Amino acid sequence: MSDNRHLPPNHLLHGKTVAIVGGGPAGLTLARLLQTNGVQLRVFERNASPALQGRGGSLDLHESSGQLALRRCGLIREFEAVSRPDAQGEKILDRHGVVLAQSDGQNDGESKPEIDRGKLEALLRDSLEPGTVSVGKTLLEIASRDDGRHVLRFTDGSHEFADLIVGCDGIGSKVRSLLTDVKPAYTGVTFVETRLLDVERTLPEIARLVGDGVALSLGDQKGLFAQRNGDGSIRLYVARRIDEHWAGEAELDFGDAAAVRAHLLSWFDGWSPTLVDMLRYSEERFYLWPLYALSHVQPWKSVAGATVIGDAAHVMPPFSGQGANMAMLDAVELADHLLDSESASIDHAVAIFEQRMFERMAPVIEGTLATQDLMFSDDAPEQLVDLFISR
């Protein structure tokens, strides 16, 4: 890894090696911002194939965060070429399939075009210098040395030294474990993710219902959330307020798609047949996704040369559409502090960044958890509709 001795002697990162752990939107945005300012670095991504990173559907990028980051990266035109500004529509339905509220997704006056996560990551990854991203690198552990450097050991037996590690490694972050013993807490809600393919031909009623945006059907502390993706497929999230370990207690094998489907269908007796058909006719793959959150108030140690951003720092449920946006904004703000000639040291820059990040995230996390409570309350979706209309 480069030690960045080509940078001016007064540059914070002069003589320092920089490692970014995680090649999602946060890590790739940070890499792009630093590289365009002359900083050499490496990104270590656990997935062996970039295509495996794309699971997770579509993201709406906000003008003041995700789009701002892409502007700073010099990639806004590339984003506009592949994003879907017509895919911002939202519908809220009850369990009988009655549409209670809908909008074009711009109630707050802010444009939030959609982009598939895989396309966003490819856009960012392709903008980096060749060899920047190393794939198939699952971090096993980090050892901190007496000289302040860190050793990253990977499951393939390799290792790297770094003066600065930025953890963009998500909910199970290894880098975060250097900074705090606090782990994300289960929020009480679980998703099961699946997809519907070729819906225009095979399920035209569902295709019309979802349109180009999102349809959220709610009731009985459960939900069926359908989201159109850029390839025309529909991503379906089966949601329920339920015990964290329900799947194990039910002895449900997620490798047995028929058994998973039958179990999930049993949750929706009395729901609209059209809504339930989304689950009945989805593909033969299901992914378990329990939702977790990290409190913005937690014991946080100061460790020289280490910090985290994105979900590694403040994972939360996806109900505000802020996760990727805040992760990319984290990258912008951290890069600004590391590139600021007024910063006294790397650790000073990181400390100021972390303080401001947590201050920014406090209302976002609280608001997201409050929205979850509305969506999975006994009288949903009425309370959510009231919030929706008042925005």
Image (cartoon, grey):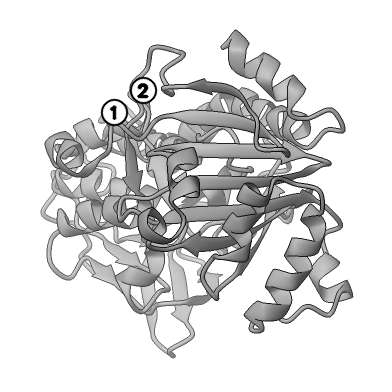
**What residue is shown at x 49% (from left), y 29% (from top)?**
90
| Mark 2 to mark 1 CA distance (whole Å) | 5 Å
Q: Amino acid at mark 1?
A: Leu
**What residue is shown at x 51% (from left), y 35% (from top)?**
321
> Dot 1 lies on which element?
helix
Crowd rating for badge 2 (residues with CA inside 10 Å; few <14, some 14–19, many 20+): some
- Of residues 212 and 29, the one nearer the viewer is 212
- In the picture, the quarter occupied by the N terminus is bottom left
Query: Where is 231 relative to 99, above or below?
Result: below
Position of 215 with respect to 192 (left or right) is left
Mark carried by residue 68: 1
- In the picture, the quarter occupied by the C terminus is top right
Position of 108 with respect to 338 (left or right) is right
> Dot 2 lies on which element?
loop
- Of residues 346 and 99, the one nearer the viewer is 99
Where residue 276 sits in the image (x, y, percent)? Answer: 66, 54
- Of residues 303 and 321, the one nearer the viewer is 321
Crowd rating for badge 1 (residues with CA inside 10 Å; few <14, some 14–19, many 20+): some
Q: Is residue 79 visible?
A: yes
**What residue is shown at x 59% (from left), y 70% (from top)?**
286
Where residue 280 sits in the image (x, y, percent)? Answer: 62, 64
In which quarter of the view is residue 89 placed? top left
- Please name the residue that numbered disc 2 is placed on: 64
- Report if the CB atoms under discs 2 and 1 are less than 8 Å apart: yes
Where residue 165 sits in the image (x, y, percent)? Answer: 42, 58
